[in-house]
C-alpha cells in the first residue's frame, strides 16, 4: 500500500452543522411534507445525494483560514491583489497546460449564480439556450429563471459510452434564435470527459453559428488516474466567445464558501458582468481558495486514489449482486451514474423508492432534465464504511422488490 498523509476513512458527524446533505433534502429531493416512512428512520438515512464530500478538507486550507482569523477584522473584502489570480492561473498551467489572461478573471458566489446572471446578460427574451441531456438541472433552472427557451440535445450511447449527437447539435445550433450553449466538461451526471476531437467539433459548430459557449468545468480536477482534461477555451485561444467556469468547491469540498472563478474573455460581456456583480467576497473564502490552489496538490492526489478505489468497489458489487445494472466507471467526478432500468418500471420515482425502502438519499434520473429515466446518481465521496452500508441497503432494496 502506498504511504498516505491524509485520512479519508474518518466518519465525521455533520449533525448540527446546517449541512444540506443532512438538513436540506426535504424541499429539494421531496416535497417538504412528503411521507418518507419506510424501512429506516430518517435519522438513520445515508446521504449520498448532494455533490459535496463527506471528507475533512485539506489541513493546509484549515491552517490558512485559522491564520486569517488571527487578524481580528473580517470586514468587506475583495480579491484586491494578484496573489490569488496567480495561484489559480499556475494551477491551470501546471495541471492543464493552459494559461488564461488573469485580466479576464472575475468571481461569483458559485458557478450557478454566475450562470443565472450570464444567461440574462447574453440572451434576449425571444432567444434560446442549448444544452445536452441528461443535464445538471440548474442549467434548465437558469434558463427558466431568465424566461429563455431551453433546447435539448439528447446524448447517445455508443458501446455503453456517452457521446454527443453532433448532427442534432448542428441542426439546433443553426437556429438563429439559438445564441448560447451551456455545456458541462466533465459532464454531470455521466462523468464523461470530452476529448479534444469532441470539443473541437462542438466548438466549431457553436462558434460558426454565432453561439456564445459557457463551459462549466467545475469537476475538471476530479479525474480518474488514466483520464486527462482539456479546457475548451484552450482549443480556441483566439475566440472571446467561450466563458470558462471553475471553482475550488467540488475539488476541495469548499462549496459552502461560495466562491467561483469565471473567465470571460469578451470585454463587453465582462464589463456588463462586473457592472452587475458586487465584488465583495468572504475573506475566509479567498484565503481558503488560494491555499487550495497553492498547496492542495498532494491532498487532491490522495483523494483521487481513494475515489478510484470507491468506484472499483461499486463496480465489483454491482457486477456481483445486480448484474442487470449498466454501470461504467466515470472518467471524472465522484458521482456514479447507474442504469437500473431492468429492475424498475419506467415511471417509478427512484429517489422516493430508495429513501423509503433503503434509507438512502440519492437522486433519480427524473431530476436531470431529460433522457435519464431509470438512472440514479450516487455520490461516492464518502468513507468506504459509509459506501458499503449505503450500497448494501440499495442492493437489498432492489432484490427484495
Image (tube, rainbow, N blue to C red):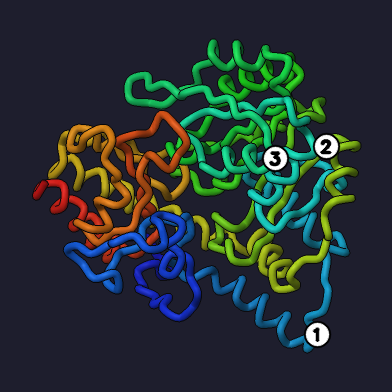
The residue drawn where x is 82% and y is 79% is 75
Q: Is residue 139 above or below residue 274?
A: above
Return the residue at label 3.
146
Q: Nearer the viewer, mark 3 or mark 1?
A: 3
Left or right: residue 23 versus residue 101 is left
Q: Please, is residue 108 above or below residue 236 in the view?
A: below
How far apart in space, not on screen, are marks 2 and 1 (Cα)?
A: 34 Å
**Nearer-N-terminus badge (2/3):** 3
Q: Are marks 3 and 1 in contact (CB under 8 Å)?
A: no
Quadrant where the N terminus lies?
bottom left
Q: CA distance from mark 2 to mark 3?
A: 23 Å
Q: Nearer the viewer, residue 27 or 265?
A: 27
Which circle's residue, 3 or 1, is located before the other in the chain?
1
In the rendered image, which residue does mark 1 sit on?
73
266 to the left or right of 334: right
Query: Which of the 4 image quadrants contains residue 284?
Result: bottom right
Residue 327 image point, x, y percent: 29, 36
Q: Residue at x 60, y 33 (%)?
A: 183
Image location (x, y in percent) of residue 73: 80, 85
Residue 164, percent from left and from top: 50, 21
Residue 397, percent across and down? 16, 52
Amino acid at each position: 500500500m502506498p504511504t498516505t498523509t491524509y485520512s479519508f476513512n474518518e466518519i465525521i458527524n455533520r449533525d448540527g452543522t446546517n449541512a444540506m446533505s443532512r438538513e436540506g433534502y426535504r424541499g429539494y429531493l421531496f416535497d417538504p411534507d412528503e411521507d418518507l416512512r419506510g424501512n429506516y428512520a430518517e435519522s438513520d438515512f445515508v446521504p449520498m445525494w448532494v455533490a459535496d464530500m463527506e471528507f475533512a478538507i485539506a489541513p493546509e486550507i484549515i491552517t490558512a483560514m485559522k491564520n486569517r482569523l488571527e487578524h481580528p477584522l473580517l470586514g468587506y473584502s475583495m480579491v484586491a491583489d494578484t496573489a490569488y489570480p496567480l495561484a489559480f492561473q499556475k494551477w491551470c498551467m501546471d495541471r492543464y497546460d493552459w494559461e488564461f489572461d488573469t485580466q479576464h478573471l472575475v468571481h461569483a458566489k458559485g458557478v450557478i449564480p454566475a450562470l443565472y446572471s450570464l444567461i440574462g446578460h447574453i440572451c434576449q427574451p425571444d432567444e434560446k439556450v442549448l444544452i445536452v441531456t441528461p443535464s445538471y438541472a440548474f442549467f434548465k433552472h437558469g434558463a427558466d429563471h431568465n424566461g429563455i427557451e431551453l433546447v435539448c440535445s439528447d446524448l447517445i450511447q455508443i458501446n455503453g459510452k456517452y457521446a454527443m449527437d453532433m448532427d442534432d447539435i448542428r441542426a439546433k445550433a443553426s437556429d438563429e434564435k439559438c445564441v448560447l450553449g451551456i455545456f458541462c466538461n466533465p459532464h454531470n451526471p455521466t462523468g464523461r470527459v470530452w476529448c479534444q476531437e469532441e470539443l473541437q467539433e462542438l466548438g466549431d459548430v457553436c462558434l460558426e453559428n454565432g453561439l456564445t459557449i459557457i463551459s462549466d468545468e467545475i469537476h475538471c480536477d476530479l479525474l480518474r488516474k488514466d483520464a486527462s482534461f482539456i479546457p475548451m477555451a484552450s482549443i480556441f485561444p483566439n475566440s472571446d466567445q467561450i466563458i470558462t467556469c471553475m471553482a475550488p468547491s467540488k475539488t476541495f469540498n469548499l462549496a459552502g464558501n461560495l466562491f467561483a472563478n469565471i473567465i470571460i474573455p469578451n470585454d463587453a460581456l465582462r464589463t456588463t458582468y462586473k457592472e452587475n456583480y458586487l465584488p465583495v467576497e468572504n475573506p475566509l473564502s479567498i484565503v481558503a481558495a488560494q491555499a487550495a490552489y497553492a498547496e492542495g496538490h498532494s491532498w487532491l492526489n490522495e483523494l483521487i486514489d481513494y475515489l478510484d478505489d470507491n468506484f472499483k468497489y461499486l463496480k465489483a458489487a454491482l457486477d456481483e449482486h445486480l448484474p442487470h445494472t449498466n454501470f461504467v466507471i466515470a472518467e471524472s467526478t465522484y458521482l456514479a451514474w447507474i442504469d437500473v432500468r431492468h429492475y424498475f418500471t419506467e415511471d417509478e420515482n427512484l429517489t422516493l423508492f430508495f429513501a423509503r425502502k433503503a434509507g438512502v438519499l440519492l437522486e433519480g434520473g427524473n431530476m436531470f432534465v431529460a433522457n435519464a429515466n431509470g438512472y440514479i446518481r450516487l455520490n461516492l465521496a464518502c468513507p468506504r464504511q459509509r459506501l458499503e452500508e449505503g450500497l448494501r441497503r440499495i442492493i437489498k432494496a432492489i432484490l427484495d422488490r
